[in-house]
Amino acid sequence: MIASAVRPGRAGRAQAGGGRLAGVGELARLALRRDRIMLPAWAYVLAGSLAEVAFSLRGLYPTAARREALVASVAGNPALSFLYGHVHGTSPGALTAWRYLAYSTLGAGLMSIFLVVRHTRADEQAGRLELVGSAAVGRRAALTAALAVAATANAVVLALIVVVSVVLRLPAAGSVAYGLATVGCGLVFAALAAVAAQVSGTPRGARGLAIAVLAAGFVLRGVGDSAGARGPEWLSWLSPAGWAEQARPFAGDRWAALALPALATVVLTVLAYVLAARRDLGAGLFAPRPGPATAGAALAGPAGLAWRLQRGNLAAWALGLLAVGVAVGAAAKGVGALLGTSAQVRQAFERIGGQQALTSAYLAAIMSLTGLAAAGYAVSAALRLHSEESARLAEVVLVTPTGRVRWAVSHLAVVVAGTAVVLAAAGIGAGLGYGLRAGDVGTQVPRLLEAGLVQLPAALVVAGVAVALFGLRPTWSVAGGWTALGLATLAALLGPTLRLPQWLADIFPFSHVPRLPGPPVTAAPLIWLSAVALALAAAGLVGLRRRDLG
């Protein structure tokens, strides 16, 4: 009897190797292939934003005297310390680290959270890990592959940050320290997301838990930095963003501070593996509590269900923009001293804010950015329709007497009301922040509330693009909705500076919004924007009625 020798394939070799980590390489390559668009986008945004900040600061503050004046004005402003942290030097690199490091750590943390949760808990809930686990793949392979992909993404970000910084003639040692501080925070939250994926039974819960810790860390860093010598400055040491700041890139390069994120990453990674060994596949560490035996009256129709599904997302956005509004509103009190050091910065704010009074221009520019943030909420809330359809949860609702249009309109009602709530929270927060420092809360809160709510029609136009694509071309809705937001953001931020032709600027909705606080409100642009948003939503609903689901 002659036995034929057959060379085993990759799966066979993984099985032969055995062990709980069998198949890690294959899963990591698959994850990188799935993220071949998202990963370069994250890396480009993080490194490109650093280049933009460094280049702008070098042009706006070219001399040592101007930089010293800027540092002197920043040092006594607790609101700016909350937003950006302490400034540890007057060199171009030190100013770049002050202006952007807190936000680059925030971006690296978000990138890592989304990556790890996507390739662990999300795949587990969708059943993909159960399918993969039936082959020659170890029990810990998926978690290890997800962490390896997150580490690879952070390594790419580190390399790009160093290259960009050196090209911009920043010191090489400080560039490495800045990059390590940024990706150190990213690795901490990659490990934290791995822990959250074991604790929570849903990807939404895992992302929410990890992002809540990330947001809490940002707030702790801000409170500690703005507390002053007699306040609780130690709070900054409880935050990974605070650890990054303690590294002091371009201002001494304290390498020892980088040991803190490294230690936290190791501890959290070990904890994730320990927790993974104590739970069943498909289940979280803590079993979800059973709901009531019967639904309340509010869940008798699709409107109540839509509110139940979206209320958590709305609460997070509203609270976040309320806190940001308070911080940026408080910073308006000292904006004259800060921007007075540079005529270019003053002119930039006046162009974006659309008026000459500096404080009003600053507040108008901030409220324009708030409108863009609210548009981000509106797009995410509108795309809940797509996620419900993709997960086949819409079918469960539509087998009842509820029609497609009624189901979609229930979610769109939450989008409209929720966007208004988010804008109102930002306006009230800015009014409180500025009013408390200026001693005029009663006047500033209504004034900035109006400035926030006037952004509503433009934000709904952006969301309307996502709704129209959902009804007409559902496979394009996610990419198209976020692309529309990206283009609107670029036009709002760079349009006044680049002085785009009027016909091109008129295409984007936020160019028609009155620049408040300041001049009186003109109703006609708001009416036209509302009509466009309504037309886009109607087109989406008509398309939804005529196409097949799924």
Image (spheres, rainbow, N blue to C red):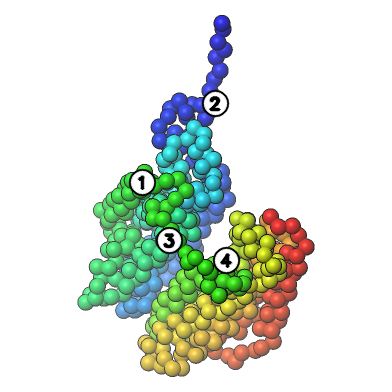
Residue at the disc numbered 3: 289
Mark number for residue 536?
A: none
Please determine whether, in this image, residue 420 is positioned above or below residue 265: below
- Cα gap from disc 1 to disc 4, whole angstroms: 34 Å
Q: Quadrant of the C terminus?
A: bottom right
Q: Is residue 250 left or right of residue 476?
A: left
Residue placed under numbered mark 4 in the picture: 380
* Residue at the disc numbered 2: 9
Q: Are marks 2 and 3 in contact (CB under 8 Å)?
A: no
Residue at label 1?
278
**Mark before the other along the chain sequence, 3 or 1:** 1
Q: SS at mark 4?
A: helix
Q: Do the residues bearing badges 1 and 4 touch, measured as CB atoms within 8 Å?
A: no
Q: Secondary structure at mark 1?
A: loop
- Residue type for callout 4: Ser
Which residue type carries mark 2?
A: Gly
Q: Label 3, secondary structure: give it.
A: loop
Real-space CA distance between mark 1 and mark 2, rounded to the nearest whole angstrom:
32 Å
Which of pointers 4 and 2 lies earlier in the amino acid sequence? 2
